[in-house]
């Protein structure tokens, strides 16, 4: 069986490959990379690397030859993302790939009026295409990466003693990227996942107010949470010379958090890992406890 891992030079793809290597599957893995130099480290581990760029349909057709399963990791580019995914899916169909596992995004609903739509839109379009492409597929609707919490609360939050984020009382389902990779490797190497959709996150959700509470316990000193208006937040970020695009992205997520757009709980992740996933408090303890 040959498994094509796209996004193999990124965090999630490379971590998934590590879990497959632990299962002694080096000869079954084919890593898709658009940057050969970045993929050299995979070659050194005995993994076959094939060139492929989502924007270049023929390169995807070539990369998919002889592949049984494809892990399609969503692109990290904001322009033309859905079409990139559609190219990969069509190439898989042309080459008779038997199963596609796609990394999507957790969400309460598909609502163009939701603050999360700027991220969800491409995933919804990709999921629709998958549902109609005729290839059995599995959706990993990933929670918000726990690994990115510090980007929102500030890496020096214990010194500033303040989380400043317009996320209100909104609750978010967080998932640790390495555990998502572990669950992906489990699904890629077991049966019974065809045409299933999994919500990949904890059995509980957490708000940034609760996160401030956890940090207060961990640090043994008060960590405050201030939720300003989104306009004031954007002005503050601009003062720190953050590029316009990044300000839009971070503020967009914060507003989506405040709307509870990712307040979805599930036991799917627990089942795929055969244990409860790491929760936010435990994660923050490993990061911040001296
Ligand atoms: N759930 C969340 O909270 C969350 C947060 C952030 C991102 N995401 C999504 O999850 C995905 C995986 O996360 P990650 O942390 O692994 O992201 P990442 O480290 O940025 O990896 C993205 C991978 O996609 C590859 N890629 C991008 N455009 C491509 C193209 N046109 N053709 C072929 N490959 C392409 C990149 O290749 P290069 O190495 O050559 O750039 C890289 O290997 C992201 O791409 C994004 O869609 C989810």
Image (cartoon, rainbow, N blue to C red):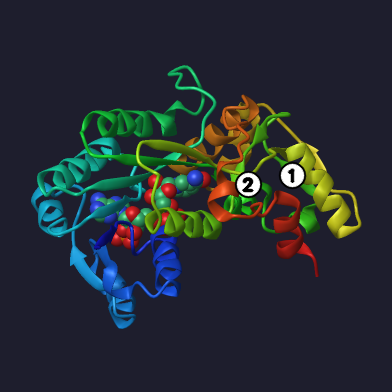
Quadrant where the image shows the N terminus = bottom left
Q: Which mark is residue 110?
A: none
Q: Please provide percent x and percent y for residue 175.
A: 58, 49
Q: Please provide percent x and percent y for residue 200.
A: 53, 43
Rendered residue at 81%/49% (across/down): 214
Q: Earlier in the sequence, mark 1 or mark 2?
A: 2
Quadrant where the image shows the C terminus = bottom right
Residue that sits furthest to the front in the current view = 192
34 vs 66, nearest the viewer:
66
Q: Is residue 149 above or below residue 117?
A: below
Q: Please provide percent x and percent y for residue 261.
A: 57, 27
Q: Is residue 126 left or right of residue 255?
A: left
Q: Is residue 166 visible?
A: no
151 vs 58, nearest the viewer:
58
Q: Is mark 1 within 8 Å of ligand 1?
A: no
Residue density around tag 1, few if under 14, some if 14–19, many if 20 or more, within 10 Å: many
Q: Is residue 274 above or below residue 102?
A: below
Residue that sits furthest to the bottom in the current view = 44
Rendered residue at 91%/57% (across/down): 220
Q: Which mark is residue 163?
A: 1
Identify the element where label 1 is drawn: strand
Rendered residue at 89%/49% (across/down): 222
Determine whether label 1 and label 2 are within 8 Å by CB. yes
Q: Please provide percent x and percent y for residue 130.
A: 27, 34
Q: Is residue 11 visible?
A: yes
Identify the element where label 2 is drawn: helix
Q: Is residue 128 left or right of residue 117?
A: left
Rendered residue at 55%/35% (across/down): 253
Residue density around tag 2, few if under 14, some if 14–19, many if 20 or more, within 10 Å: some
Between the residue at mark 1 and the residue at mark 2, the CA separation in whole angstroms equals: 8 Å
Q: Can you identify the residue that label 2 sits on? A: 152
Corner quadrant of residue 89: top left
């Amino acid at each position: 069986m040959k498994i094509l891992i796209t996004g193999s030079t990124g965090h999630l793809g490379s971590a998934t490959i590590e879990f497959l290597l632990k299962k002694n599957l080096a000869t079954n893995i084919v890593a898709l990379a658009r940057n050969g130099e970045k993929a050299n480290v995979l070659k050194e581990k005995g993994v076959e690397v094939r060139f492929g760029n989502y924007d270049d349909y023929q390169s995807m057709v070539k990369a998919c030859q002889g592949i049984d399963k494809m892990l399609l990791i969503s692109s990290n580019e904001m322009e033309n993302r859905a079409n990139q995914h559609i190219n990969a899916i069509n190439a898989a169909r042309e080459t008779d790939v038997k199963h596609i596992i796609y990394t999507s995004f957790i969400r309460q609903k598909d609502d163009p009026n939701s603050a999360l739509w700027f991220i969800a839109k491409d995933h919804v379009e990709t999921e629709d295409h998958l549902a109609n492409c005729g290839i059995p597929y599995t959706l990993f609707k990933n929670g918000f990466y726990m690994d990115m919490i510090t980007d929102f609360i500030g890496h020096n939050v214990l010194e500033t003693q303040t989380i400043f984020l317009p996320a209100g009382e909104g609750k978010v389902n967080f998932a640790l990227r390495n555990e998502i990779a572990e669950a992906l490797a489990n699904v890629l190497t077991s049966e019974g996942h065809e045409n299933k959709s999994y919500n990949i996150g904890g059995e509980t959700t957490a708000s940034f107010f609760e996160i401030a509470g956890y940090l207060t316990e961990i640090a043994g000193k008060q960590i405050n949470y201030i939720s300003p208006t989104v306009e004031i937040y954007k002005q503050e970020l601009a003062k720190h010379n953050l590029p316009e695009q990044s300000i839009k992205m971070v503020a967009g997520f914060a507003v989506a958090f405040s709307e509870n757009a990712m307040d979805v709980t599930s036991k799917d992740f627990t089942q795929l890992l055969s244990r409860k996933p790491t929760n936010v408090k435990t994660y923050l303890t490993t990061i911040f406890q001296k």
